[in-house]
Image (tube, rainbow, N blue to C red):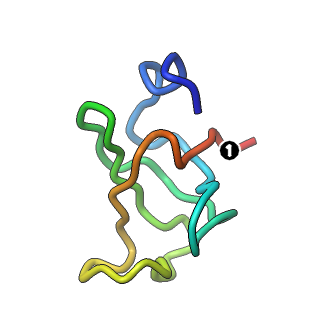
Amino acid sequence: MTMEQLKELKVGDMCTIIRGHDAGRLCEVAYIEGESVLVRSADGKRFSSLTQYGRLRLTSWRELKLAE
């Protein structure tokens, strides 16, 4: 994702994670704060990253791309 795409990103937009254990997973934007994005699992399954929330993941805009 580019910085221009981040500025246009809205809650509810669909994205794909491009790095890490969850690479290729479809997700929905739940919250945006600065350059951090909170995403929700689109399929309702837990993310592979170890967090207490499981279905939510806080990530960087550099680890996302807009879903096609």
> Would you place residue 2 above or below residue 50 in this image?
above
Residue located 53% across and 49% down the image: 63
Residue located 35% across and 67% down the image: 56
Residue extending farthest to the right is 68
Which quadrant is home to the N terminus? top right
Q: Is residue 56 left or right of residue 27?
A: left
Residue located 58% across and 75% down the image: 21
> Would you place residue 17 above or below residue 50 in this image?
above
Circle 1 residue: 67
> Would you place residue 66 above or below residue 52 in this image?
above
Which quadrant is home to the C terminus? top right
Q: Is residue 10 left or right of residue 48?
A: left
> Would you place residue 21 above or below residue 9 in this image?
below
Q: Pick whichever, 20 or 24, lies toward us.
A: 20
* Rendering coords of residue 41 (x, y %): 48, 67
Q: Pick whichever, 59 or 30, lies toward us.
A: 59
Q: Is residue 66 left or right of residue 34?
A: right
Figure disc tally: 1
Mark 1 belongs to which amino acid? Answer: Ala
Mark 1 falls on what kind of element? loop
